């Protein structure tokens, strides 16, 4: 039975992903403890063992703004996301190499590329983790351990963690998403299963964006569903 | 190795096309340059001063190079003052901004340039060292930008210019923490860029690569030897493809972005690498 280890239970999709993966016969381990230290991640490794897929999600966020005065709230969230990824990739990654198994998957967001306007801590962390993933792809990839990233659109329109007056990050499927589909756990599941499979043997250092085209939305174009378009 | 910090013609003058009058682009403005005493930072400090800005040069505990750069600027008629500061410490950001206001009374341009690069692979990185790279290369940019924000607002034409690296786009393969920090700088730049315009502030990043600089004194002996051999090998490999750049190349771009001419640039990442990333 293949084992999937999620490093951060705070990610809003982890609960549903766990159910979907278990239904498919995977063993799932979700971490909810602090792994920003060597001791923390070693304790996790002792409990969970080396997985077949190490899913690093780093979902610490902060509503502190860059024009506010609480820099330390932002620093603390960024540190949590980056240091937990570092500890997991270093210690669990090394164990996976020893056992010649697995793949590393970063469960990230389009906010690794697009600013949030309302949650700089998350965007800064995901930007950093994107380069971290690429570095891992070169270093561990050379030894047979691949690293890749899944970039999801914001999970739900009403997610208060990403509300912004400055950047409209609202997941407005009517006007901004050509596919008119909302991203859900099944999207993430498909990408995880792909990266776990042999079909992905040459996927290393890459990222898959699952946003229905939202990232390329520009200005006030309204995407009319095809069935309503009158052909000329 | 001796680096010529005056290499390249400088962008320092603007011309009023109606009157034909020439003025220095940054006359009367005040700038902070972190890590401004050596390497790329020194090239930036000199160019800013030549363009008329008063410059606070922030060096680390070893102030010699920051002081020498200030002396060089003053010898050419510019204004610059040094400040010693460990930017890895949270309280340093406010100290830098307070010092600048005390010396010059205003702040218009913040150049986040300080960098620390121990050159290690992930398995060789102790947690504390990894964290220190983040503190200097990423968190100091964040903290200083936030401390500077009220004064940049007051300026009405504030500029934040983050000196990232080509390794913010493409892997370094010799320092995972360095590249990670630069990936964070990319998104910090974009977040500041969407927030800034309402206050008249722009934020951009410059990504230098292949710049001739003094070798880093903070490196340990073995690392330094290895790093030098990488640089020599790389120079040999690319000899006929591109030429190494100078700190003044980056300095010129900073002056442009800081000037009125640069005001429509916001949230960009401009490579200054001679095309190295494409090879």
Image (cartoon, coloured by chain):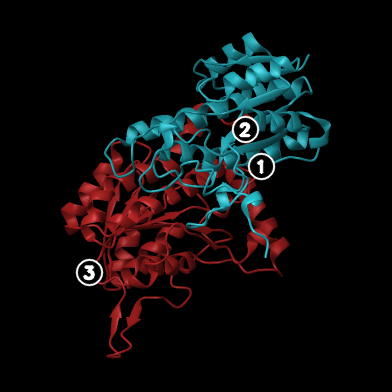
**SS at circle 2:** strand
Residues at discs 2 and 3 in contact (Cβ within 8 Å): no
Q: Is residue B245 left or right of residue A79?
A: right
Residue at numbered disc 3: B28
Judge whether A54 appears above or below B77 on screen: above
Q: Is residue A76 visible?
A: yes
Residue at numbered disc 1: A207
**Residue at x 53% of width, y 15% of height:** A39
Q: Nearer the viewer, mark 2 or mark 3?
A: 2
| Quadrant of image for the N terminus of chain A | top right
- Asked if marks 1 and 3 fall on the same chain, the answer is no
Tell which chain the image draws in red: B
Residue A53 in the image, given as x and y percentages of width and height: 70, 24
Q: Which is more N-terminal, label 2 or label 1?
A: 2
Foreground: A218 or B205?
A: A218
**Residue at x 70% of width, y 64% of height:** B238
């Amino acid at each position: 039975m293949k084992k999937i280890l999620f490093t951060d239970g705070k990610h809003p999709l982890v609960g549903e992903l766990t159910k979907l993966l278990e239904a498919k016969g995977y063993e799932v381990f979700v971490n909810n403890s602090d792994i920003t230290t060597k001791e923390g991640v070693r304790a996790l490794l002792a409990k969970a063992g080396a997985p077949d897929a190490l899913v690093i999600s780093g979902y610490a966020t902060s509503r502190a703004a860059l024009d506010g005065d609480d820099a330390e709230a932002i620093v603390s969230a960024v540190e949590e996301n980056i240091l937990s990824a570092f500890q997991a990739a270093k210690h669990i990654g090394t164990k996976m190499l020893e056992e010649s198994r697995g793949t590393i998957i970063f469960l990230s967001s389009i906010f690794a590329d697009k600013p949030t306007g309302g949650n700089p801590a998350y965007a800064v962390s995901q930007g950093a983790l994107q380069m971290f993933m690429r570095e891992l792809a070169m270093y561990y990839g050379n030894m047979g351990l691949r690293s890749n990233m899944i970039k999801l659109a914001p999970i739900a329109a009403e997610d208060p963690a990403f509300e912004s007056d400055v950047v409209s990050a609202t997941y407005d499927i009517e006007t901004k998403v050509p596919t008119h589909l909302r991203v859900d756990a099944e999207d993430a599941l498909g990408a995880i299963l792909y990266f776990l499979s042999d079909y992905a043997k040459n996927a290393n250092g890459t990222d898959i964006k699952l946003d229905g085209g939202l990232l390329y939305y520009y200005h006030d174009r309204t995407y009319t569903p095809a069935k309503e378009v009158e052909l000329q | 190795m001796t680096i010529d910090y005056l290499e390249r013609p400088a962008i320092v003058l603007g011309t009023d096309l109606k009157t034909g009058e020439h003025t220095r682009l940054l006359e009367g403005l005040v700038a902070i340059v972190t890590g401004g005493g050596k390497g790329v930072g020194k090239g930036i400090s000199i160019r800013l001063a030549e363009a008329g800005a008063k410059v606070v040069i922030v060096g680390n505990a070893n102030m010699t190079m920051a002081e020498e750069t200030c002396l060089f600027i003053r010898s050419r008629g510019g204004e610059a003052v040094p400040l010693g500061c460990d930017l890895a410490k949270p309280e340093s950001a406010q100290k830098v901004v307070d010092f600048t206001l005390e010396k010059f009374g205003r702040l218009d341009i913040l150049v986040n340039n300080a960098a620390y690069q121990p050159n290690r692979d992930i398995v060789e990185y102790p947690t504390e060292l990894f964290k220190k790279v983040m503190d200097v290369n990423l968190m100091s940019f964040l903290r200083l930008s936030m401390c500077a924000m009220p004064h940049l607002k007051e300026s009405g034409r504030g500029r934040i210019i983050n000196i990232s690296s080509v390794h913010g786009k493409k892997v370094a393969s010799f320092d995972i923490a360095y590249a990670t920090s630069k990936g964070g700088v990319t998104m910090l730049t974009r977040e500041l860029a969407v927030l800034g315009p309402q206050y008249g502030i722009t934020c951009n990043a410059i990504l230098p690569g292949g710049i001739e600089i003094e070798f880093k004194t903070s490196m340990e002996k073995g690392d330094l030897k290895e790093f030098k051999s990488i640089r020599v090998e790389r120079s040999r490999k690319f000899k006929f493809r591109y030429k190494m750049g100078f700190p003044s190349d980056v300095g010129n771009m900073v002056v442009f972005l800081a000037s009125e001419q640069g005001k429509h640039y916001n949230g960009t990442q401009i490579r200054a690498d001679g095309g190295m990333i494409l090879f």
